[in-house]
């Protein structure tokens, strides 16, 4: 068999095999289940790395397809599209999957649902890996939905908690809203072009759609991206999704699954480029999401929520960059972000696991700073998020800002710079809050997981070290990766003008953000009150997430539950059923009426008979 | 339509197995419930094997009607015993076999009036099998009525929750339907003047004028549409689902509602293609209303079985929408959806039946946290719920995909509305799952048993079928396509 095909099959299907094996056979044996899942994802990573190595030299794309089903004129194929973009994403996905699954050995140790956890993780790994290499939009949609299902299952993993099951449901339904738009866009393209092959769409087949239709299709597909990547206005599910176990948040809700939206835009960028109106909308939505989520992160006290808001904001930033034409910039930031954001979550997970709370101030009070490795890695990752050199985030942010600077409208660049400032501020606000000794002194209460066995600690520490290494070094891979991506993408890199002042401004703003955070939270006499909280109304607005959730809940209740759904349920109860019941009762009553005439009223009949005969006699004889 | 006679009367063998099983059950003493259950299981298992064999043995390259058996019954009236199977009926026969066998196994723990129960189920299923294989209008109608009457007793005796009302409502509705179907059959047979009830003879192009076709199609559509749960004639269905005992709910929602859609297809569309085209707009409208309305009404239900009942209304709307598109993809999708929905609701009711048997309630507010004590039973219902939401790689996705694609081509606005209803159906299904299975464990459910392996077997089979056709939809679509393509070629543009 062709080694490339074999590697692609390994990279996608082994986790599915692990899922099946765990569900069918080993679900009562936690250790074996975890071993199967980790072995499978390690194999998948090996396959992905092999593909990366092969394609690195070849600089071309390979496609395999086979007929899956057919109906009429429609043929649905499945297969692999292996080009630099998909293989890079595949490597990122499988690598983060492997690290997070190893980490979970420690984090989830002793959980009664241990085997179930690894089954769901394998399901996700299969769906996500297959999503990245899909050659058609339809196959991509299939796995797009499946990652949604695994996200639903994993957010609600601790289903005994009401908030967890609620968050899982909310995540599924809100992303479903976007997915319906995506599906309609898919149908629109399929109806008018007869196929949804990604390479053909990118190669200009989309020109077959008239301009108006193309814009509508692009916007509908973008609806799916909005849902999956938690962009405005569908952004409120992601912070709630933090109810899931922390490794899940690291894998699905920051590094890979939510990035699938950005990946889809990168995948279809030439197609989207044919619809400039859609690109402007994407720029606007990305900007709005980035700024809104940043403001929410300014005031949050929950460590995971801060990183969740920052995920929304960074994804918005990537969308901005892509929509401005920065293909390499967007994809590179996606890659670096996957590394440092997973690191942020995993470090936070160590603290949460050890101290049993998500609250930053509580963590600080309970002595989080004593966890040297975790806090050090957290600081490195936060610096990368803030875009400080020489960490990976610095390089990718520079690329994104350069792409925005190349856009004729300066508003987007200004918004991007403001975002960079806010990001640095809230990231280091958290760090300083954790590090600074709180006013009341530290509690010396023994932590709940004090006696964690060394194996647990090792399993949780190793991925941190690896990811910290990646965060430190990945930035230097910018040039070769950019060349690799540009070779397969078929995209001419936009001639981004060289702005010598841009890196300095960006770093300056990031440093200013860090400095402000230090002034407010870090120094010894710090007031420990953020600038946003000085205006209570503003702080409340941010803390309540701009009241978006209130609005949605109100709308759901008024329009759906007590509106349309009530109307339909009452329609059955008050209109259709009574009509039918009335018809039946009327028939019975009518029968009863008529039955009177058969009830043996002899005199009445005699009278009737007499009258009829009399009438007849009168008409006949006169 | 090309005919291929059978070398062995497989189709009659299915009917005879049912009939033989019925006789055997009647002959056994009522006290020997174990023997009765074993006879039922074995006979229904044989029908499943036979229908699966036919599905596999059908020569797809040749197409047309195969395994044909023909016998003059009343020559002076042109009535024949005429059976055959094509790409539409084989999926339905397979579905009936699956639901019948798993339904019998699901009722393994039944204790009250076992003999009567299984005898009536066998009678019902004989009618169902007969209807799917018959190609003679007279026999079709007879089988149709055979499959309806046992339902009344099954619900009224073994049911729950307003069972007399539900049983009577169902019977009256379905009889109203057959009061429309019989005149339509007689009208067509008389108008043709061929002195035959033979479907293949009557469906030759030019037999009926367009006006006659329009008239007869409307009667067929309304008559069978009642059984298929077409809005606004759907309210018998949730009420009947709720009132029926588990296996009857399974057969009822799994197979009986499919008879409605199959009747529209086999009689309405085969005999009156002109009428089909003429009334397609109306069908599309009612189907879309049904999809949206069923999903929205489902949101407000508090009884587990009502939730499933309304989801059935919504899903059968998808079948109707597929048929309304008058296109290859739409009909393919509709037939696939009939199969997928049948298996899915059977799994639903089978899982919910276990929960109801053990907890003695199906009110969602009284349940909660069942995943702790009944992980397997919960997993089956959750799988069915995910199928119902239209998750890919579970059977119903592919049917919905094709129907929505065809609908979007034919009626963009209605298609978009129907797709939008997917959000609502996700919302109400997940709400049901959350309130029933998630949450802290409840004290009073702590001691309840989970499904043991042997009793869980029917659910395992249904889940496996959902996954097989979810991963390999071509197995089913290639079969359906052998019937769809010739059918659509015969429809005037």
Image: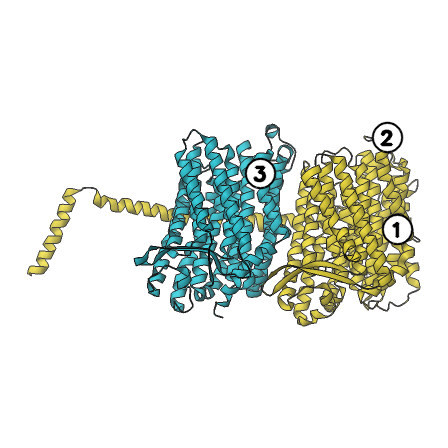
Chain A's colour is yellow
For residue A121, say whether it is visible.
Answer: yes
User: How far is mark 3 from mark 2, CA to CA?
Assistant: 55 Å
**Residue of label 2:** A443
Give yes or no for contact between labels 1 and 3 (Cβ–Cβ under 8 Å).
Answer: no
Chain of the residue that carries numbered disc 2 in the rendered image: A
Compare residues A125 and B73 and report the one nearer the observer: B73
Q: Are marks 1 and 3 on the same chain?
A: no
Say above or below: A108 vs B60. above
Whether the residues at callouts 1 and 2 have beta carbons within 8 Å, the answer is: no
Q: Are marks 3 and 2 on the same chain?
A: no
Chain that appears cyan? B
> Of discs 1 and 3, which sits in the foreground?
3
Q: Is residue A601 above or below residue B220?
A: above
Chain name for mark 1: A
Residue lying at 41% horizontally and 60% vertically, measured from the top left: B199
Residue under numbered circle 3: B457
- Whole-percent x and y of residue B177? 39, 52
Q: CA distance from mark 1 to mark 2?
A: 31 Å
C-alpha distance separating marks 1 and 3: 54 Å
- Residue A384 numbered mark, or none: 1
**Which quarter of the figure has residue A102?**
top right
């Amino acid at each position: 068999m062709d080694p490339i095909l074999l590697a692609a099959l390994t990279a996608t299907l082994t986790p599915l095999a692990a899922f099946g094996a765990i569900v069918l056979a080993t679900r009562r044996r936690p250790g074996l289940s975890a071993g199967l899942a980790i072995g499978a994802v390690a194999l998948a990573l090996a396959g992905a790395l092999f593909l990366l190595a092969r394609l690195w030299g070849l600089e071309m794309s390979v496609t395999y397809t086979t007929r899956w089903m057919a109906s009429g004129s429609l043929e649905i194929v499945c297969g692999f599209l292996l080009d630099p973009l998909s293989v890079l994403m595949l490597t990122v996905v499988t690598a983060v999957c492997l690290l997070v699954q190893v980490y979970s050995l420690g984090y989830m140790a002793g959980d009664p649902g241990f085997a179930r956890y690894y089954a769901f993780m394998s399901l996700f790994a299969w769906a996500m890996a297959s999503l990245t290499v899909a050659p058609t939009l339809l196959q991509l949609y299939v796995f797009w939905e499946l990652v949604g299902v695994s996200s639903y299952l994993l957010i609600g993993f601790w289903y005994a908690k009401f908030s967890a099951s609620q968050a899982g449901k909310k995540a599924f339904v809100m992303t479903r809203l976007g997915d319906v738009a995506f599906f309609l866009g898919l149908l629109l393209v399929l109806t008018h072009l007869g196929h949804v092959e990604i390479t053909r769409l990118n190669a200009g087949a989309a020109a077959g759609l008239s301009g108006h239709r193309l814009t509508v299709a692009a916007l509908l597909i973008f609806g799916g991206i909005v849902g999956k990547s938690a962009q405005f206005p569908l952004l409120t599910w992601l912070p709630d999704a933090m109810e899931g176990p922390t490794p899940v948040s690291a894998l699905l809700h920051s590094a890979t699954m939510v990035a699938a939206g950005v990946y889809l835009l990168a995948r279809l960028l030439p197609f989207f480029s044919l619809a400039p109106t859609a690109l402007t909308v994407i720029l606007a939505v990305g900007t709005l999401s980035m700024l809104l989520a940043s403001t929410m992160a300014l005031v949050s006290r929950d460590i995971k929520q801060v990183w969740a808001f920052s995920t929304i904001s960074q994804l918005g930033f990537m969308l901005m960059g892509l929509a401005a034409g920065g293909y390499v910039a967007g994809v590179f930031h996606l890659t670096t972000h996957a590394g440092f954001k997973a690191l942020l979550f995993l470090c936070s997970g160590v603290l949460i696991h050890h101290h049993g709370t998500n609250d930053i101030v509580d963590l600080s009070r309970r002595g989080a700073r004593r966890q040297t490795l975790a806090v050090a890695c957290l600081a490195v990752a936060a610096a990368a998020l803030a875009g400080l050199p020489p960490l990976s985030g610095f390089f990718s942010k520079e690329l994104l800002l350069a792409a925005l600077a190349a856009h004729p409208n300066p508003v987007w660049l200004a918004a991007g710079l403001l975002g960079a400032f806010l990001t640095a501020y809230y990231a280091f606000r958290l760090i300083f809050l954790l590090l600074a000794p709180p006013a009341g002194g530290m509690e010396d209460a023994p932590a709940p997981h004090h006696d964690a066995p060394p194996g647990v600690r090792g399993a949780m520490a190793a991925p941190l070290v690896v990811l910290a290494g990646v965060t430190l070094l990945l930035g230097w891979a910018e040039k070769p990766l950019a060349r690799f991506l540009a070779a397969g993408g078929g995209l001419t890199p936009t001639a981004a003008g060289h702005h010598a002042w841009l890196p300095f401004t960006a770093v300056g703003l990031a440093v200013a953000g860090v400095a402000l955070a230090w002034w407010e939270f870090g120094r010894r006499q710090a007031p420990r009150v953020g600038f946003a909280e000085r205006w209570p109304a503003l702080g409340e607005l941010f803390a309540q997430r701009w009241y978006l959730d209130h609005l949605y809940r109100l709308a759901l209740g008024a329009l759906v539950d007590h509106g349309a759904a009530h109307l339909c349920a009452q329609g059955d109860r008050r209109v259709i059923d009574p009509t039918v019941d009335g018809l039946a009762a009327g028939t019975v009553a009518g029968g009863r009426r008529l039955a009177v005439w058969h009830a043996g009223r002899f005199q009445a009949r005699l009278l009737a008979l007499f009258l009829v005969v009399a009438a007849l006699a009168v008409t006949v004889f006169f | 339509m090309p005919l291929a006679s059978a070398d062995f009367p497989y189709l009659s063998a299915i009917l005879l197995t049912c009939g033989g099983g019925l006789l055997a059950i009647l002959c056994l003493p009522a006290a020997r419930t174990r023997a009765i259950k074993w006879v039922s299981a074995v006979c229904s298992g044989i029908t499943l094997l036979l229908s699966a064999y036919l599905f596999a043995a059908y020569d797809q390259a040749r197409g047309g009607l195969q395994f044909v058996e023909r016998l003059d019954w009343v020559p002076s009236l042109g009535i024949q015993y005429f059976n055959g199977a094509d790409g539409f009926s084989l999926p339905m026969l397979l579905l009936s076999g699956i639901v019948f066998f798993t339904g019998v196994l699901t009722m393994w723990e039944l204790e009250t009036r076992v003999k009567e129960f299984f005898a009536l189920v066998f009678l019902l299923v004989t009618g169902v099998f007969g209807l799917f294989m018959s190609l003679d209008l007279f026999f079709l109608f007879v089988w149709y009525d055979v499959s309806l009457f046992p339902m009344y007793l099954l619900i009224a005796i073994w049911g729950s929750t307003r069972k007399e009302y539900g049983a009577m409502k169902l019977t009256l509705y379905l009889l109203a339907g057959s009061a429309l179907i019989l005149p339509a059959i007689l009208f067509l047979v008389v108008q043709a003047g061929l002195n035959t009830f033979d479907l293949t003879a009557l469906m030759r192009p030019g037999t009926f004028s367009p006006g006659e076709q329009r008239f007869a199609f409307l009667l067929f559509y309304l008559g069978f549409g009642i059984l298929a749960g077409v809005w606004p004639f759907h309210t018998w269905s949730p009420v009947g689902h709720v009132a029926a005992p588990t296996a009857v709910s399974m057969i009822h929602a799994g197979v009986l509602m499919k008879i409605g859609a199959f009747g529209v297809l086999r009689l309405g569309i085969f005999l009156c293609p002109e009428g089909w085209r003429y009334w397609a707009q109306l069908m599309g409208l009612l189907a879309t209303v049904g999809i949206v309305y069923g999903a929205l009404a489902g949101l407000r239900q508090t009884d587990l079985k009502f939730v499933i009942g309304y989801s059935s209304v919504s899903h059968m709307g998808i079948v109707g929408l597929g048929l309304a598109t008058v296109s290859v993809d739409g009909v393919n999708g509709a037939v696939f959806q009939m199969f997928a929905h049948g298996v899915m609701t059977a799994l639903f009711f089978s899982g919910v039946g276990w929960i109801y048997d053990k907890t003695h309630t199906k009110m969602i507010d009284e349940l909660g946290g069942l995943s702790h004590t009944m992980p397997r039973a919960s997993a089956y219902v959750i799988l069915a719920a995910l199928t119902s939401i239209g998750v890919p790689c579970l059977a119903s996705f592919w049917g919905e995909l094709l129907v929505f694609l065809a609908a979007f081509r034919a009626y963009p606005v209605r298609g978009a509305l129907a797709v939008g209803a997917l959000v609502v159906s996700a919302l109400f299904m997940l709400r049901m799952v959350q309130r029933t299975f998630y949450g802290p464990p409840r004290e009073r459910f702590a001691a309840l048993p989970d499904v043991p392996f042997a009793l869980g077997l029917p659910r395992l089979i249904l889940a496996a079928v959902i996954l097989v056709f979810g991963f390999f939809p071509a197995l089913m679509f290639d079969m359906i396509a052998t019937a769809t393509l010739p059918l659509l070629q015969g429809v005037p543009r």
